[in-house]
Protein backbone atom coordinates (compact mmCIF):
# COMPACT_ATOMS: atom_id res chain seq x y z
CA UNK A 1 0.00 0.00 0.00
CA UNK A 2 0.83 3.66 -0.14
CA UNK A 3 2.73 4.96 2.85
CA UNK A 4 2.91 8.70 3.50
CA UNK A 5 6.35 9.87 4.58
CA UNK A 6 6.72 12.06 7.63
CA UNK A 7 9.50 14.64 8.22
CA UNK A 8 11.15 12.32 10.76
CA UNK A 9 11.52 9.70 8.00
CA UNK A 10 14.13 11.91 6.29
CA UNK A 11 17.83 12.12 7.18
CA UNK A 12 17.93 15.88 6.66
CA UNK A 13 15.70 18.87 6.02
CA UNK A 14 17.39 21.74 4.21
CA UNK A 15 16.05 25.27 3.70
CA UNK A 16 17.30 27.31 0.78
CA UNK A 17 17.52 30.69 2.50
CA UNK A 18 17.42 32.96 -0.57
CA UNK A 19 14.14 33.67 -2.28
CA UNK A 20 13.13 31.48 -5.20
CA UNK A 21 10.87 32.10 -8.17
CA UNK A 22 7.84 30.13 -7.00
CA UNK A 23 6.85 29.36 -10.59
CA UNK A 24 9.69 26.82 -10.56
CA UNK A 25 8.66 23.21 -10.42
CA UNK A 26 10.60 19.97 -9.89
CA UNK A 27 13.22 20.55 -12.60
CA UNK A 28 13.97 24.16 -11.63
CA UNK A 29 14.13 23.42 -7.90
CA UNK A 30 16.31 20.35 -8.56
CA UNK A 31 18.79 22.61 -10.36
CA UNK A 32 18.98 24.86 -7.29
CA UNK A 33 19.63 21.85 -5.05
CA UNK A 34 22.52 20.80 -7.29
CA UNK A 35 23.96 24.31 -7.82
CA UNK A 36 23.88 25.14 -4.11
CA UNK A 37 25.16 21.74 -2.97
CA UNK A 38 22.14 21.28 -0.70
CA UNK A 39 22.43 17.49 -0.66
CA UNK A 40 22.00 14.39 -2.78
CA UNK A 41 18.81 14.85 -4.80
CA UNK A 42 17.84 11.20 -4.54
CA UNK A 43 18.83 10.94 -0.91
CA UNK A 44 16.47 10.85 2.07
CA UNK A 45 16.17 14.64 2.28
CA UNK A 46 13.54 17.38 2.16
CA UNK A 47 14.52 20.57 0.30
CA UNK A 48 12.47 23.62 1.30
CA UNK A 49 12.07 26.82 -0.75
CA UNK A 50 10.15 30.09 -0.37
CA UNK A 51 9.41 33.08 -2.55
CA UNK A 52 9.90 36.76 -1.82
CA UNK A 53 6.80 37.17 0.35
CA UNK A 54 7.31 33.95 2.41
CA UNK A 55 3.58 33.18 2.26
CA UNK A 56 4.23 30.09 0.17
CA UNK A 57 6.74 27.26 0.53
CA UNK A 58 7.59 24.31 -1.70
CA UNK A 59 9.16 21.08 -0.48
CA UNK A 60 10.98 18.80 -2.93
CA UNK A 61 11.97 15.20 -2.19
CA UNK A 62 12.68 11.83 -3.79
CA UNK A 63 10.36 8.98 -2.84
CA UNK A 64 12.07 5.92 -4.45
CA UNK A 65 10.02 6.06 -7.65
CA UNK A 66 10.36 9.70 -8.57
CA UNK A 67 10.40 13.26 -7.32
CA UNK A 68 7.55 14.67 -5.27
CA UNK A 69 6.75 18.33 -4.79
CA UNK A 70 4.61 19.56 -1.92
CA UNK A 71 3.37 23.12 -1.45
CA UNK A 72 1.78 25.08 1.37
CA UNK A 73 0.29 28.54 0.94
CA UNK A 74 -0.69 30.75 3.86
CA UNK A 75 -3.63 33.05 3.27
CA UNK A 76 -2.77 35.80 5.76
CA UNK A 77 0.48 35.02 7.58
CA UNK A 78 4.11 34.63 6.49
CA UNK A 79 6.54 31.81 7.24
CA UNK A 80 9.38 32.80 9.58
CA UNK A 81 12.65 32.53 7.66
CA UNK A 82 16.34 32.36 8.65
CA UNK A 83 17.26 35.82 7.32
CA UNK A 84 20.19 36.42 9.68
CA UNK A 85 21.76 32.98 9.29
CA UNK A 86 25.06 33.37 7.37
CA UNK A 87 24.66 30.03 5.57
CA UNK A 88 22.91 29.85 2.17
CA UNK A 89 21.43 26.48 3.17
CA UNK A 90 20.06 25.96 6.69
CA UNK A 91 19.50 22.49 8.19
CA UNK A 92 16.46 21.82 10.36
CA UNK A 93 15.40 18.93 12.54
CA UNK A 94 12.05 17.29 11.85
CA UNK A 95 10.75 18.91 15.02
CA UNK A 96 11.86 22.37 13.88
CA UNK A 97 10.29 21.79 10.47
CA UNK A 98 6.96 20.90 12.11
CA UNK A 99 7.20 24.09 14.18
CA UNK A 100 7.96 26.12 11.04
CA UNK A 101 4.85 24.71 9.36
CA UNK A 102 2.86 25.74 12.45
CA UNK A 103 4.21 29.30 12.25
CA UNK A 104 6.82 29.28 15.02
CA UNK A 105 10.05 31.18 14.45
CA UNK A 106 12.44 28.30 15.04
CA UNK A 107 15.42 30.67 14.94
CA UNK A 108 14.21 32.49 18.05
CA UNK A 109 13.26 29.37 20.00
CA UNK A 110 16.25 28.28 22.07
CA UNK A 111 16.38 25.04 24.09
CA UNK A 112 18.25 24.75 27.37
CA UNK A 113 21.99 24.75 26.92
CA UNK A 114 23.85 21.49 27.47
CA UNK A 115 25.57 21.31 30.85
CA UNK A 116 28.76 19.32 31.33
CA UNK A 117 30.26 18.57 34.71
CA UNK A 118 33.22 16.61 36.02
CA UNK A 119 31.48 15.02 39.00
CA UNK A 120 28.19 14.85 40.80
CA UNK A 121 28.18 16.51 44.23
Image (cartoon, grey):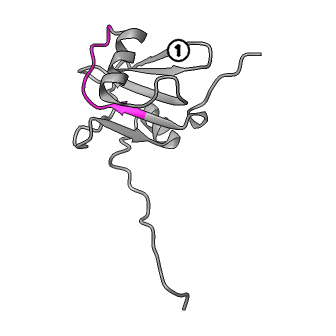
Q: Quadrant of the N terminus?
A: top right
> Residue 36 occupies which quadrant of the picture?
top left
- For the point 30% across and 35% down, the residue is 81
Q: Is residue 18 rendered magenta in the image? A: yes
Q: Is residue 15 rendered magenta in the image? A: yes
> Residue 49 occupies which quadrant of the picture?
top left
Q: How many marks?
A: 1
Rendered location of residue 73, percent (x, y): 40, 17
78 vs 41, left or right, is left
10 Å crowding of disc 1: few (<14), some (14-19), many (20+): few
Q: Main secondary structure of the magenta part?
A: loop
Rendered location of residue 7, percent (x, y): 56, 33
Depth order, front residue of 97/55 = 97
Secondary structure under the numbered disc 1 in the rendered image: strand
- For the point 38% across and 44% down, the residue is 106
- For the point 41% across and 34% down, the residue is 14
Q: Which range of residues does the magenta coloring cover?
A: 14-23
When the figure is inspected, residue 4 is found, relative to residue 112, above or below; the finding is: above
Q: Which residue is mark 1?
A: 68
Rendered location of residue 115, percent (x, y): 45, 73
Tell me if I can see residue 55 in this picture. no
Depth order, front residue of 56/5 = 5
Q: Quadrant of the C terminus?
A: bottom right
Rendered location of residue 37, percent (x, y): 34, 30
Amino acid sequence: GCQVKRPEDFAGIFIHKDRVDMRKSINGLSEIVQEEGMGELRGPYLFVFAGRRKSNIKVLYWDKTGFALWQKRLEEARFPWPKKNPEAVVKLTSEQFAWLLDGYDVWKVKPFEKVDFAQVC
